[in-house]
Image: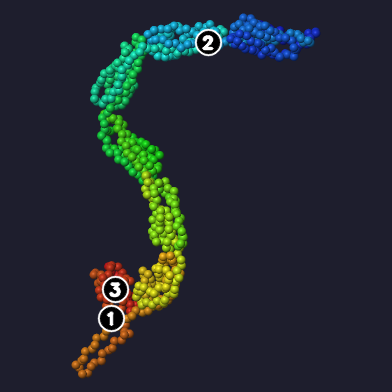
Amino acid sequence: MRKKFLAAILVLGIFTLHTPSSFAAYPRVSLPVPQTAKFDQGSATLVPPTSNSSGAWSVEITDPTIATAKGLVVTILKSGTTGVTYTQAASGTFSSVSRVSRFTVEKGIPTVGTFAPITATLLSRTIKLTAPTSTSTAPWSYRSSDSKIATISSNNATFLDAGTITITAIQSASSNWEGTEVSTTLRVTSLPRILGTFTNIMIAKDSVLSLNLIEPTSSSPGAWTFTIANSSIASLYGKVLTPLNIGTTTITAFQAASGGFGSSTLKMTLTILGATATVGDFKDVTYVMSSTSSNTLSIFAPTSNSPGTWSFSSSDTSVGTISVALGNVGNIRVFKPGNTTITASQAVSGNYGATTATLILTVSGNPTYSAIQDLQKVVGDGEQTVLPPTSTSAGAWTYTSSDPEIVAISGSKLIFGNAGSATITMTQAASEFWLSGTLTFKVNVLGTTPTVGALPPVSVEVDQTLLAIPNPPSSSTGKWVYTITDPTIAKVVNNTIVGVSVGSTTIIATQSPGGKYGQSNSVQSIITVVPATIKATPTPTPKASATPKPKATPSTSTTSKPVVKVKVKKKKKVIRIAVTGSIVKVKINGKKGKLGKNKVKSGPNTVVVRVGSTIIFNKTYRIP
């Protein structure tokens, strides 16, 4: 019916807008906007449509039970929605005009007074709750946050235990007001009580079949009840406690509220112990890291008479971690030098309790260094400090020289002396988790070139060894070293000259560094190898013959060819050599032999016989 009425007014307004007057024009008027107000506002000023007429606006409320109007000001009476007719009075050349819209009054939010905190004694048992003041007249209800402390029926609170809870007052919604809530605290106090202790219990699993719990002493007469947190450790029926398995759990003793005394709760720890396992050694381990290995090692759990499983852990995983643990073997992966504690933990099993063993894993490493460049100095250069390279180790450094006459050491300073080469060894001492390390470099000290005179000519016989030759004069004391241009004529053996065959060649002498002098310039001369001196064999003096007529004896010529006879006894590995007609030299396999019996080895044996530099016999005999 209200909708039909609003529609009739809207049609009437439109009809009025389009019905021309014989003496005035209609103003241009916008459509009015529906407006809303809250019930608790009391009044509201409505905003009319816009218009090009200056005529005054007035408002007519369709449902005067919701609001009444005076001009554009409405007085709110209740919540709801009503039609509103905006009418603009005629003004000047413009006639009067009307528009219809809607005005809604929403429910208000009540203003609630203070809900003061409440304190009562458990002994008082009940209290009547008083609702706070409110601009709404709707009824109140109440809610308790903990029904174990207090229950609420209507506006009466009944106390069951001491404690502090929240009481919420709830005002229901009405036709003009929204519902609302407000809370306060209810503190229910207990009579002063004195409680005894609830002592922890620690027993062995098989020490007792069961035991009775003792109620703690209390000034309250309330009944005690007991509960256990983990019934797999022990069973609890009333006060009877029966151990079942090794472990730890909590037992709670609860005393109910009674006679003005509030409830009480006490807790204690129950520990069921197993037999202590007998565990073997778990010895400390030292490991040296290497850049060429995987840096893993295995450790074995100690022996134990418990069958419980083992697990492993590391106290410092930056040093080493347990990467795999299988059975009683743990594989450790190490990362850097240092110490870490490895803990082997054995789980509870049967009648045996858990146990642990620890060892210290010490990881050592070899420090690495960057190379130090070799040095080249000159005799007379000043001392030079050589700093050690950077190192992860803090060990002290020491220096040593392979030849202090060439390079002497003072701390980290090198002091250069005579010419030559020396190797400097830098050693870093072991430090904490780092092993000792070394590195070396060479120092070549160049000396002054000595002044050297001429090398006199040298002469030597075939197979003769000259242990010393007249060296050139020199300002240096360095050792002379020789070389021969043609080693088929003469050769150098251990820096001595040996004649090989008749002839001449060049000998070169070079003086090694000595003292402040470096290597000399080379000097050379001629070395001549002459035949070996042949010693004559004495001829026996002939005895006088009784025959008056001596017979002619053939003379022996010194130019007759020598005769060489060789007999070989293969089984005895003997070569027997006989020579007639000349003085000879014998060599077997390049080594000096002799006339007569020569003991030889299995294999090829070459016999060479010389007269001077001439080979008169050369043959190889194979000895089995």
Check disc 3 and report the residue beneath it.
Answer: 593
Between discs 3 and 1, the one toward the N terminus: 1
Image mark for residue 125: none
- Find out whether the residues at labels 2 and 3 contact each other: C-beta distance under 8 Å: no
Looking at the image, which residue is at 39% across and 38% down?
317
**Alpha-carbon neighbours of circle 2 within 10 Å: few (<14), some, or many (≥20)?**
some
Give the alpha-carbon distance from disc 1 to disc 2, as whole Å.
154 Å
Q: In the structure shown, which secondary structural element does the residue marked by tag 3 occupy?
A: loop
Q: Is residue 84 left or right of residue 233?
A: right
Residue toward you, 586 or 47: 47
Q: Quadrant of the N terminus?
A: top right
Residue 138: percent from the left, percent from the top?
52, 6
Between discs 2 and 3, the one toward the N terminus: 2
The three-letter amino acid code for the residue at tag 1 is Thr
Q: Nearer the viewer, mark 1 or mark 2?
A: 2
- Find out whether the residues at labels 1 and 2 contact each other: C-beta distance under 8 Å: no
Between discs 1 and 2, the one toward the N terminus: 2
Residue 100: percent from the left, percent from the top?
68, 10
Residue 350: percent from the left, percent from the top?
27, 29
Check disc 2 and report the residue beneath it.
Answer: 112
Observer able to see residue 98: no
Check disc 1 and report the residue beneath it.
Answer: 580
**Alpha-carbon neighbours of circle 1 within 10 Å: few (<14), some, or many (≥20)?**
few
Give the alpha-carbon distance from disc 2 to disc 3, as whole Å.
138 Å
The number of numbered discs placed on residues in the rendered structure image is 3
Q: Which of the colour schemes (rainbow, by chain, secondary structure, one colour) is used?
A: rainbow
Residue toward you, 347 or 608: 347
The three-letter amino acid code for the residue at tag 3 is Gly
Residue 442: percent from the left, percent from the top?
43, 58
Looking at the image, which residue is at 27% across and 70% down?
600
